[in-house]
Amino acid sequence: MFVRRVAVVGVGYVGLTTAACLASLGHRVVCADIDKRKVARLLEGHVPILEEGLTELVAEGLASRRLDFVVGAANAVGDAEVVFLCLPTPMGAGGAADLSAVEAVIAEVRELLPADCVLVTKSTVPVGTAARVVELLGRDDVSVVSNPEFLREGSAVRDFMHPDRIVVGSDVQHAAERVSALYARVGVPTVLTSAASAEMVKYAANCFLAMKLSYVNAMAELCERLGADIADVAEGMGFDHRIGQSFLQPGPGWGGSCLPKDTHALLRMSEAAGFDFALVRATIDTNEQQRDRVVEKVVAAVGGSLDGVRLGLLGLAFKAGTDDLRDSPALAVARKLRERGADLVAFDPAVPAPVAGVTDDVLVVGDPQQAVKDADAVVLLTEWPEFRKLDWADLAERMAGRVVVDTRNLLDQDVLRLADLDTVGIGR
Ligand code: UGA
């Protein structure tokens, strides 16, 4: 196999996972970030994010010397054959992706990149960005490739090592082949295409997933109104292999650092191209309505008003298996409950302490018992499996009220019934 000298710029969950996994595939990887403290901690083996298997891979990479961390992109790219840009592309003004981090790094490294090197964008970037990067670089001897990532937070290492597919796009075929060869040991179908198509695959996939979730959440609402059960409906739909069982779990709406930003960005791209992508707009609107529907459920569960009502919240992260609070539906719902006058006490296994500016609407406590104490109702917002195994009889005794709003349909209703608690779910 070819061992390549790789540089990865950005040690967020995408960059760090990419770097650690490429090192474990045998490549020599130098990973750069502007955050000195993060780099120093990583050199000691401290992984700053909750990501299964990542700490072990980083330790292995450091021990084998196939993985190194440096401060500043300029210090990583000097002898790289392939440079991956894994930088944040947050939602900018008007919903379009903000590319300032990508542009800044290109300005920093453009003269330092060795001849024949390949520059790869892994960050989710608007269609047409690779062409723009070629212009910004202004180098005929450096090729640009788009290689979007499909990693889910919480299972990023598994998703990298066992992906459904790898997508590599470039207008320079040998550069695309060089990047796809890095993954030779992963052994899955690779789609080789143009840079613009590769960039579009990422948006198309994430927005389709968001649409699937909005569809199932809206279907859950209709199930409630017409007396059907969304769990059975989703199961019945999911056996059709054209639909599939995954991503059919209703909830308080979808969130996180990717789907919200990518749906907005696709909508902006469509508008700029003169196309009204009504499906994507409806996907976003339905998600906003879902959060409101959850709030109305809670209001109804406590008798019509949240004024002075004490609620115990279980879960703050945007999904289970991560400590990421970015665009968390749990926090969006919490904010709305707070605006309606509720007092909120919350527990999340991955968020042990308040995060200034983020969890200001809730009092964060260290265990579920404190969260539910004297609560008029409990609202479960993140699908942590451990919530299912809680001692619900004990929790019921600590609560003032009798109702649990389970926005993830996670809990065993029979167990709660035995604890003399009523469960309000989604779509049942
Ligand atoms: C998402 C995509 O799933 C990845 O393929 C993609 O690589 C990544 O974005 C990215 O662009 O980097 P992620 O943001 O980690 O991954 O989260 P998901 O697992 O997709 O969950 C998104 C939201 O949907 C969460 O709020 C989750 O709770 C919700 N969800 C998911 C449901 O409500 N029901 C489901 O059945 C599945």
Image (spheres, helix red, strand yellow):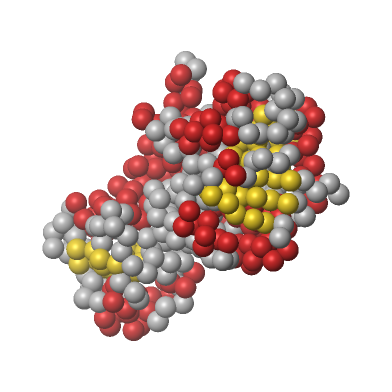
Q: Residue furthest left?
A: 308
Q: Is residue 281 above or below residue 135?
A: below
Tell me the quarter of the picture where residue 43 sits. bottom right
For the point 36% across and 46% down, the residue is: 290
Q: Nearer the viewer, residue 92 or 282?
A: 92
Is residue 271 rendered to the left or right of residue 144? Answer: left
For the point 25% across and 57% down, the residue is: 360
Q: Residue furthest right?
A: 1
Residue 226: x and y in percent read: 40, 49
For the point 60% across and 44% down, the residue is: 75
Q: Work out whether residue 47 can be spotted.
A: no
Q: Is residue 377 above or below residue 149?
A: below
For the point 52% across and 60% down, the residue is: 40
Q: Nearer the viewer, residue 337 or 376?
A: 337
Is residue 320 rendered to the left or right of residue 58? Answer: left
Q: Work out whether residue 194 can be spotted.
A: yes
Q: Nearer the viewer, residue 368 or 179?
A: 179
How many numbered circles are shown? 0
Quarter containing the C terminus: bottom left
Tell me the quarter of the picture where residue 409 sits. bottom left
Q: Nearer the viewer, residue 405 or 326?
A: 326
Q: Is residue 129 above or below residue 421?
A: above
Residue 203: x and y in percent read: 55, 34
Residue 420: x and y in percent read: 32, 79
Is residue 419 rendered to the left or right of residue 214? Answer: left
Q: Residue furthest top?
A: 274
Residue 382: x and y in percent read: 42, 61
